Amino acid sequence: MKRKLQRIWRWSWVVTLPLAIVLVIWGKATYERWATFQVRHATSEDFSLLKVGAMQAEHMLREGQVQLVSRSKIRDLEQSGLDTVHLYLDRNGQQSLDASLPHSGFEYVKGGMFYDGQRRKVKLRYRGDNVYHWGYWKKSWRVKTSRDDLYKGMRQFNLVAPRTPEILNNYLAYRLASYMGLIAPYSEIVNVTLNGELLGVYVLTEQLAETTIRRFDCMPGDVYSGELVGMDAYQGIGNELFNAASAWSKVAINNHFEENSMTPLRRLLELVKHSDSAEVQDQISEFVDLEAFGRFSALETLVCTVHIDDVHNWRLYYDPWATQMKPIVWDPVGWHRTMVPRPATPYRPDVISSPMHIALFRNAEFLRAREKAFEEFFRAGNDKAFLAEARHLVDSLPLALRHDPNLVAELEILSPEEVKGAMDQLLSTIEGLFEMVRGTYVDDRGARVQYRDVSQGVVAVEVTGRRSVEQIALTYDRTVGGPVRSAVRWYDNDGQPVSVDVTGSTQVIGNRIVFEREFIAHLRENLPVLKGTDMWKNGLVVEPGYYELLVQADFDLGSLQGVQCKRSGAEEWKLATVQPNMQPTGMGKVRNLIVPSPVVTPEVWSGEREISGSVVIEGDLTILPGTDIRLHPEANVLVLGRLSAEGTEKEPITFMPANEGQDPWGVVAVKGKEANGSRLKFCHFKSGSGWKMELAEYSAMFSVHSVQDILVEDCTFEESKVVDDMVHIVYSNADFVRCKFIRSLSDALDADISTVVVEDCVFVQSGGDAVDLMTTEATIVGTILDGSTDKGISSGENSRVLVIDTLFHDCEIGIQAKDRSQVSVFNSDFVACRMAIDAYKKNYQYGGGGFAYVHKSRFLSNELPLRADANSKLSVEDSYVDSAFDFRPKRILLQSTVDVGTNAPARVKFVSPLPGEVFRKHVEPRFMQRVRQDTRGSSLYSGKGAD
């Protein structure tokens, strides 16, 4: 026995030494983490020695388990279905980041990342305000690439360590935002390795920048960031975002204005501060994109968050061309377990967590937009599509979780099974919450409408429920004898009557008078808590909304027989019930309950008219043939309704300087959806410039902003002054037919994020580009571009251009395709240009060059026919080039059907069907018919070399 004990003692070191080593490692790691996050840097979480020691021990066990699962974790990750982000960092960089956490972690160090088939240089640092980002083994990272090596179109992105057991809160919230058409960062679930060692599952999230808003087809503009927590908080003073613009910063700028300008944000904060006023609410309706904020508010309800509040997580984008402020979704932390419905936290259909929310919830147009967002989300089946996508993701994650050595939340080491269970519970919670929201905003089973016949021509109605009533019909005992005048009256919080004319939206149909306005219930705000974690208690109390429908007629209406109503989104009419005891009640603090709709007679201009200063036409404007409009220096005309300016060849409409030799006049502009369908014909614009204000800019003498279906025929634009463009369209759909653009100061026609047709037009001596396109679909047919100082067509920022039967003559560059733009050219001539076609990469934010495809065209007397950089491609088929030139075959592909330096430029090699990919769905058949398969070149040039 003694000998046996001696033998055990002699070999005990085999057990005790490894155990001692493990205990030393455990003790050292425990002490360092405790000293860092409990002693030296007090955190919001309990990093007590006992807690840290237990967590450290569990983590060491978890690492051992992962090692046993697989000895080739990185290779196995290829089976997980997730992308893997491979980071590299040398020892000096790692030591620099970890030297004195958390502060040392926020300075970039040089590192590397493997993507697109090679290892590339990047900058790395930690990110995040709270300890769960940098206090555990799995730290959150900020990655910054070079401009030339974007990763999935991003220069900066975050690798966020999940803070909750269910991992997917923010990722799924961002995905839901995309279903609702909101601006939000790109996000995906990924695996991350560092120097070949697996760190685990992360949430990749784009860092907001100009690239974000460009990805959502928005014009470059200011993006404001509101953060007053953690290291961004001020000490010794209140931290309230909506008290001062100085509390905000910019993450993107509009370079047309001063970089430090905060004017749009100051304007918003001033409106929020005085939102009690009906006049201010009118201004909010114009300045704030209520449709977007309605969807944003609906998202907050659907993801059950109050994480966007008075102190953090606000991101706002100001669009200077639409002159509206729009929301950006950022860090919503959806469906956090402290916020989802449970006994202590009941379901809340309304999220009101900041002064911005309060201001919006007092605006009836916002409330209607919010209701519409819910209705569209559910009726389109987006709830089911989203849940199916989420379920597919959850079911695909177990392999990645099994290999993740760093599953931790709130100082608790988690097993893969616990995380999968938490994700399953999350999906169950989301599904249940969606049903609650559907019942509240779509089904709304408790809704009803009651009425009382007050007197001849006055009918009182009460509306209850969260779904608005979009039509109310008064039915009489006889046919209504003609047009009527109508209004809606309600009473404000002080009992004072407010009435608006709605004659323009009231229809007379047989024996019925139909009010086509949206009526909402009285949504009384209940705001017990405006700060802190109890903001979930805020909300709306639904009470009956009282209105009086007023009808005036020059005849006897007869006797009221009944009232019918149609709810928003409903197909059928329902009978309202009689309530003889109904009495007027106030409608609280909600303003602009009914949108006025008076009968508006279009303003008519004729003869000679002088314009000084700025004239804003709120409704439609008709300009008669022969009208001579004389504009004084800096005079502007802005039409917010439909413009009908249709002159004739003999009686054109002119927009000219009031006096010879004067300074330039400003702009003629049409803006907004009420201007849809505007028409201009035989109009002559000369010597205008632009109009720049504190909050808006019109950058051409003829400007079109957010207008669809505008047709400009047989018009002449001549000699623009001062500003960049002669004609500018943005967020619009416009056709220019048989127009002339003569001697523009810079660009003649500039189109941004639009659809444009240029048909049978002429551009002469453009001072810059004849046609400048950004993120635009353009069809250019039968057009002459002559003498452009810069480009004939500049196609940039992911534009798509189809060119047919067009002549480029004496241009510096005929066509330039850049930044992922694609240009398809048929039957066109490039004559005497310094360069015919150029393709290259200009703007790093698009991550690629240009692409051009040329068919049955001719290149004559150009200094250089074709050029493409390393990021671009040109392809030429069945065309003629009159002289040989040097080129790189990998960039420029000349098909065997191309003739170079021969004497047969017009002779085609073959007749083939049109390549389908170059014709987009919106291209009209009449344009396709102008493609000539039996000849090369255009019908517009017959000079030297054309035979």
Image (cartoon, rainbow, N blue to C red):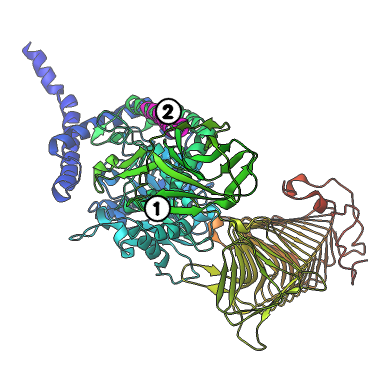
Q: Position of residue 61 (x, y in %)?
A: 26, 28
Q: Quadrant of the C terminus?
A: bottom right
The image quadrant of residue 466 is top left
Residue 440, compared with residue 870, is above or below; it is: above
Q: Is residue 426 magenta?
A: yes
Q: Residue furthest top?
A: 1
Q: Position of residue 75 (x, y in %)?
A: 46, 33
Give the residue type at disc 2.
Leu
Q: Main secondary structure of the magenta part?
A: helix
Q: CA distance from mark 2 to mark 1?
A: 65 Å
Along the horizontal axis of the image, is 496 left or right of 746? left
Along the horizontal axis of the image, is 889 left or right of 141? right
Give the residue type at disc 1.
Pro
Residue 237, compared with residue 833, is above or below; it is: above
Q: Residues within 10 Å of mark 1 (few under 14, many from 20)?
A: few
Along the horizontal axis of the image, is 928 left or right of 689? right
The image quadrant of residue 437 is top left
Residue to which mark 2 is pinned:
399
- Is the residue under label 1 in contact with that under label 2 (CB below 8 Å)? no
Q: Nearer the viewer, mark 2 or mark 1?
A: 1
Q: Secondary structure at mark 2?
A: helix
Residue 249, compared with residue 511, is above or below; it is: below
Q: Position of residue 549 (x, y in %)?
A: 49, 45
Q: Residue at x 26, y 48 (%)?
A: 530
Residue to which mark 1 is pinned:
497
Front residue of 906/64: it is 906
Front residue of 767/457: it is 457
Q: Is residue 516 visible?
A: yes
The circle on residue 259 is: none
Q: Which residues are magenta?
A: 425-446
Q: Earlier in the sequence, mark 2 or mark 1?
A: 2
Q: Residues within 10 Å of mark 2 (few under 14, many from 20)?
A: some
